[in-house]
Amino acid sequence: MTTHPWFGTGAAPTLPLPGTQIRQVVRREIADTGVPPREILPAGPFMIPRSSYVELFRASRAILDLLRRTALQIAPTTAGRLEAYGVSDEDYPLFLEDELLEERYASCMARPDIIIGPGGPKFLEFNVSGAAVGPVELHSLLRAWDFLYRRRDAPPFRIDDPFAARCNLFGDVSAELDVPARLLWVGSVRDLKHTTNTRYFDMELEYLHRHGFVADHAEPEQLDELLGTGAVARYRLGLRHFTIPEWRELGIDTTPVHDALKRGCLLLSTQTAAFLTNKKTLGLVSEGQPWMSRAERELAHTYIPWTRVLADRDTTRDGRRIDLLAHTLRHQHDLVLKRGIGMQGLQVTLGRDATSEHWHQEVQLAAARCDSIVQEYVEPGRCHVELSFSDHDPTPQITEVAPVLSPFLFGNYCGGVWGRFFATGASGIVSREGYGALENAVVAEL
């Protein structure tokens, strides 16, 4: 299979260093960052043309804006949006009393998941949250590549650091709200994968310290003490680094977070971000909304695979009216079923990999619940990356893979691009925690 021209060469110039040295540096940088222990390691970053890199961020910003406008216009109030999405305040329990702030900062942090289809980038979903996985891992990988390439010469690529972008976002917000440059990273070590220490949080806090912030990590049980006893909370701004489903599964109480919000500690992203993350919103954008301009409809058609909120109803496909439920049942091998609320690819069913009986059962249930989308399956393009497969044979090997690309958006700032893939070159549901995908940094040619 040939590599997709959108990727250019796809791999950075080979490092003139022993594979053992590359592996040591990569392992050192990614230790205790959430990356699972593994034998196969990247031996160089993905490198794509500058024009391709810029396209990812340009399209991401435009689609994120459509998602935000769609979620807010589905109903004029939070209560109305909960009803429209068929969810409750138990699903989304941390709304602010100040609805203007709630809406203002709903889309301040986002990470789409993108594949490169035959015609270019296709957005499969959007993670809109301060807890989207990847910034720490990406920062660590970028540190590794910057260090290794500088051993011989300047790196032949540009780096956008997610820590720098998120730092700049919080600088803008603290200035906009006129609050002190004191930040609280609210998250739990219990929620981290593959580590039991706080390096995951400490790395970013140290970066913030070097750039003029006072910043601390807080387990939820520490919030009351850290916020102080005064009328005004000691920390007025911070990061909400957790998801409700994961904390609920771990038995972690969100009441201290709710109390912190009531005391005026704004944790980003706000709860409204969950409406943007809900895959039903992507389906509504793909279908088109009455207020969307012709240019916005064309943008959605270009970058979003055909996606619809699944129900027993009519819709359009390729300019013609169809019975959506019948179409979904009939065209199993061309479609993907996704729960609106889901993570790690665990609530996704690929029609091509399911039995007919299982597909029909899942589709009928999803249509009855109206809690899912159906999406066109797009075969991803391939590119090259250098991998080192083991300590016993560390020599880097050029390998063809089908990556999912995830640019990070922090306000107006580009936070770099994270990539996940299978070393076998397989496609499908590419998820690290759900399916064991590997990861790497994506950089732009100079």
Image: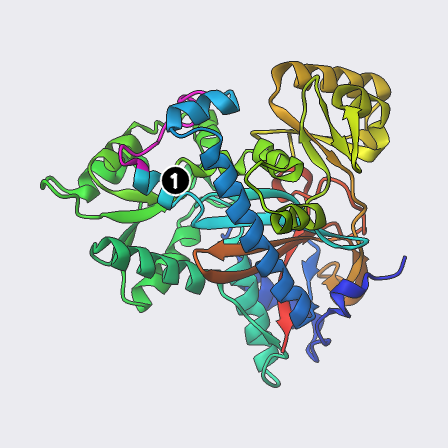
Q: Relative to 270, is 367 above or below? A: above
Q: Relative to 443, is 152 above or below? A: below
**View extreme (right): residue:** 1
The percent position of residue 401, horizontal first and vertical second, equals 78, 55
The percent position of residue 198, horizontal first and vertical second, equals 39, 49
The percent position of residue 410, horizontal first and vertical second, equals 45, 56
Residue 96 forms part of the magenta stretch = yes
The answer to which of 59 and 404 lies nearer the viewer is: 59
Q: Quadrant of residue 342?
A: top right
Q: Answer left or right for 413 relative to 320.
A: left
**View extreme (bottom): residue:** 153
Determine the secondary structure under disc 1. Answer: loop
The answer to which of 340 and 431 lies nearer the viewer is: 340
Q: Which residues are magenta?
A: 87-99
Q: Answer left or right for 375 relative to 195.
A: right
Q: Residue at x 25, y 42 (%)?
A: 265
- Colouring of the image: rainbow
Q: Answer left or right for 277 relative to 352.
A: left
Q: Answer left or right for 249 relative to 312.
A: left
Q: Which residue is mark 1?
A: 188
Q: Residue at x 24, y 36 (%)?
A: 260
Q: What is the magenta segment's predominant secondary structure?
A: loop
